[in-house]
C-alpha cells in the first residue's frame, strides 16, 4: 500500500494535539482563513470528536477533505481550501 501522506504536500501545518473540542476545529478554521484557495492544510489532533467536526466542517464550508487517518491516537486531516 502506498503511503498516501507522502503524496500530500501541505502548505500549512496546524498542531492541535492535546486540545479539546472545539479547539482543533477553530484552529483549522483560522488557518484556512489565512490561506489561498487551493492550498492544503494538514491538521493533527488527538481529540476523537475532531473526526466528526472536521468532516462536517469541510462539507459545510466547501473545503475538500483530501485524506483523514488515525495513527496511535492521533488524527490527521488534509484539507484543500475551497475556491473563493
Image (cartoon, grey):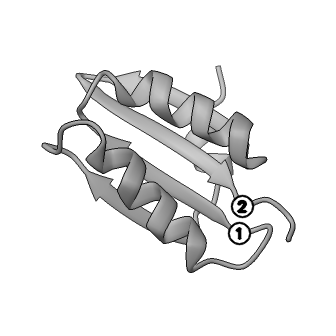
Q: Quadrant of the N terminus?
A: top right
Q: Is residue 29 above or below residue 7?
A: below
Q: Are marks 1 and 2 in contact (CB under 8 Å)?
A: yes
Q: Is residue 58 above or below residue 35?
A: above
Tell me the residue that label 2 is attached to.
81
Circle 2 crowding by C-alpha within 10 Å: few under 14, some 14–19, many from 20: many
Q: Position of residue 6 (x, y in %)?
A: 59, 48
Measured Cα–Cα span from mark 1 to mark 2: 6 Å
Residue drawn at 71 percent across, 69 percent down: 39
Please state if 30 lies on the left or on the right of 14 as rendered: right
Q: Is there any visible trace of residue 65 in the rendered image?
A: no
Residue drawn at 72 percent across, 61 percent down: 81
Q: Quadrant of residue 10?
A: bottom right
Q: Earlier in the sequence, mark 1 or mark 2?
A: 1
Camera-side residue of 58 and 40: 58
Q: Quadrant of the C terminus?
A: bottom right
Q: Is there any visible trace of residue 4 in the rendered image?
A: yes
| Secondary structure under the numbered disc 1 in the rendered image | loop
Please state if 10 lies on the left or on the right of 46 as rendered: right
Q: Position of residue 51 (x, y in %)?
A: 45, 24
Circle 1 crowding by C-alpha within 10 Å: few under 14, some 14–19, many from 20: some
| Name of the residue lying farthest toward the right | 83
> Which mark, by number, is residue 61?
none
Camera-side residue of 22 and 14: 22
Tell me the residue that label 1 is attached to.
39
| Secondary structure under the numbered disc 2 in the rendered image | loop
Q: Position of residue 30 (x, y in %)?
A: 46, 68
Q: Is residue 44 above or below residue 10?
A: above
Residue drawn at 72 percent across, 79 percent down: 36
Figure label count = 2
Q: Position of residue 42 (x, y in %)?
A: 50, 54
Amino acid at each position: 500500500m502506498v503511503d498516501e501522506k507522502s503524496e500530500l504536500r501541505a502548505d500549512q501545518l496546524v498542531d492541535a494535539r492535546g486540545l479539546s473540542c472545539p479547539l482543533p476545529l477553530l484552529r483549522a478554521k483560522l488557518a484556512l482563513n489565512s490561506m489561498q484557495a487551493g492550498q492544503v492544510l494538514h491538521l493533527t489532533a488527538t481529540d476523537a470528536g475532531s473526526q466528526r467536526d472536521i468532516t462536517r466542517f469541510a462539507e459545510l464550508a466547501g473545503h475538500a477533505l483530501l485524506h483523514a487517518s488515525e495513527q496511535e491516537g492521533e488524527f490527521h486531516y488534509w484539507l484543500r481550501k475551497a475556491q473563493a
